[in-house]
Image (spheres, rainbow, N blue to C red):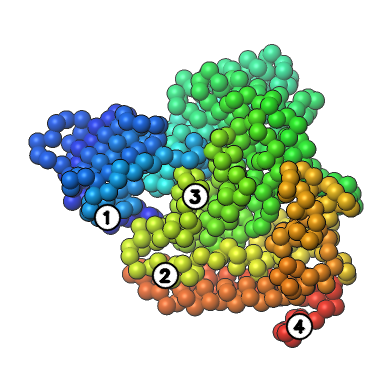
Amino acid sequence: MVSAAWLPPEALRAIGSRRAVVRGEGPPVETVVREIAAAGGHVTFNETPTAPADFYLDSGYGSPEGFTLQRSDGVTYVRAGDGNGLLYGFFEVVRRGEAAFGADFGPEEHRPVMRRRMLDHWDNVAVHPVMGQVERGYSGGSIFWDNGKLRDDLDRVSAYARLLAATGINAVAINNVNVHAAEARLLTDRLDDVATIADRFRPYGIRTHLSVSFASPVTLGGLPTADPVDPAVVSWWERAVAAVYDRIPDFGGFVVKADSEGQPGPFAYGRDHADGANLLADALAPHGGVVHWRAFVYNHRQDWRDRSTDRARAAFDHFAPLDGRFRDNAVVQVKYGPIDFQPREPVSPVILAMPNTRLAVEFQVTQEYTGQQKHACYLAPQWSELLNWNGVADIAATGDGVVAVSNVGDDPQWTGHPLAQANLYAFGRLAWNPALDPAAILDEWADLTFGPGLREPLHDILDDSWRTYESYTAPLGVGFMVQPGHHYGPSVDGYEYTPWGTYHFADRDGVGVDRTVATGTGFTAQYPQPWCDVYESVATCPDELLLFFHHVPYTHVLHSGATVVQHIYDSHFAGAEAAERMRTRWHDVTLPDAALHAKVSDLLDEQVRSAREWRDQINTYFYRKSGVPDAHGRRIY
Ligand code: GCU
């Protein structure tokens, strides 16, 4: 049985007892009609009702995707800008339940802050020998693909689209950014597969996007080059894109990972990323499509001995000088931090450096570095903090919006860990409005998913779970220290002598990466004032980012008053204890679904085990390096 997640039948109970009138046209409007009927409600569609209704939903008012919600004289009104707005207004009423049909309120204006609210699937069509069916997927196989083929039964895609629409998501990319041979062909001879998936998303107001390979003119088209200024290459892309729009008129566009971790790109031809992105943007423009061009570009074959190269600098060095050169429909998609989806990173300076470029900020709902859906780790507080830092949300809103790597697979719970559903829900809600309070989003999710009564334990378990995860893993912003390859569990030196550029430089005296202008890699200079100064000085650098920016002695005293090494011990003991409290708290919860309860219990056992493993390896490592004993005499091995 597939979990109903946040849309169980009970969530639509208030709708089911109402008489509704729906007016409008297009697939999302028809979806609303079907939803009301399926919930048991009486619905009149584009006709004059024979009896007075208590729920009116009308489209054709106001801005695209927005809606006005009002209750007056015992009638609830959703007046929407378009079909998507109507759908979002409908789901807002679902969220409120009976309250939407109680006392008068409004009119309230609702409009998404981000124009694009997108999920990227890192799903492979064919099972990849190393990465499997879903790269960094922790929820089973793909809901789209099975061992080289489009799945016969795509009802789960429809169910997924429905869940996403209820959070406000309006775009999905259906294949991995690492485009291997089978996946490349989705663009051409396997376009029917893409069209079939797009048919499932369309009723829910979601556009389908595709990751494509920059080398397609060579690998698929048989041309001798993929050089972006070669006229034959330009016309190959024009023809390929025209064929896509012939088949899928509302196709969203492309996602491209180029010159990154072995993917082909414009560098091979002596061109830059603007040349590459604009090639695709120009092909897409006549059809209204966009290209999401990822800024995750760095040297993944670095010599660890080379202290002049700093991976954190790479995206800015490649992209900031190109500001203003990208077409209007070329979106530069930037990971939130300069390295790679770590539990704690500063905001990427690229986001602040490209005022004349349409940007999207990229997050990871899949928990590659935050416990891989074995650990309960509610990420909304992290995303909220990043988006609300120094105008990041405004930059994304004036640009393209926000994107995240999905955490969904064919697992019956959708997300492996049942509590990881909260992250998927919260991402959509924060994309809609980054000012929403993560705790309030958790209330919504808890009530819809479990009915009333579970808010308190879920807050106790999840509210601080991201900070808890941070506290028992890699300290003070240093990041990584994970097992190489799969990235689960601790390995302090796992990446220290590798080509990946993710080092901590711990020695007997201290730890951290000197990224200052004065003595380090100069990365701090990529930030505008005041941040370059704030990060440059140990006196002003925030504790939680200290080791991201500085190499300091173990005896360095933090703003908190603790020394670095004592903080490492304290936070790891505290983090592992917090994980134990999460488990204890869950034991007190009663759920009608005993199997679900047991599943979460088992996962919390693993989280406690893993947190202890992290605690003991990290503490032991730094005790052995520094020789400084724990001030509280606790057990270190
Ligand atoms: C991380 C991740 C890769 C992924 C890459 C990306 O490095 O480990 O699996 O391909 O990010 O974002 O492209």
Distance of label 2 from label 4 (alpha carbons): 35 Å
Residue drawn at 76 percent across, 31 percent down: 321
Q: How many marks?
A: 4
Query: As displayed, is residue 286 above or below residue 99?
Result: above
Q: CA distance from mark 3 to mark 2?
A: 22 Å
Residue 445's place in the image compared with 335, above or below, is below
Picture disc at residue 631: 4
Going by the picture, which residue comes out furthest to the bottom? 633
- Residue under the image location 13 percent in, 35 percent down: 49
Q: Pointer 3: what residue?
A: 435
Say whether residue 468 is left or right of residue 408.
right
Closest to the observer, 201 or 53: 53
First in sequence, mark 2 or 4: give its number. Answer: 2
Q: Residues within 10 Å of mark 3 (few under 14, many from 20)?
A: some
Label 1 close to label 3 by CB (< 8 Å)? no
Disc 1: which residue: 99
Q: CA distance from mark 4 to mark 3?
A: 41 Å
Q: Nearer the viewer, mark 4 or mark 3?
A: 3
Question: Residue 372 location, x and y as percent?
Answer: 59, 59
Whole-percent x, y for residue 75 in the image: 19, 44
Q: Earlier in the sequence, mark 1 or mark 3?
A: 1
Going from N to C along the chain, the mark reached first, 1 or 4, is 1
Q: Of marks 1 and 2, which one's residue comes earlier in the chain?
A: 1
Q: CA distance from mark 1 to mark 4?
A: 54 Å
Where in the figure is residue 570, as x and y percent of width and height? 69, 76
- Circle 2 crowding by C-alpha within 10 Å: few under 14, some 14–19, many from 20: some
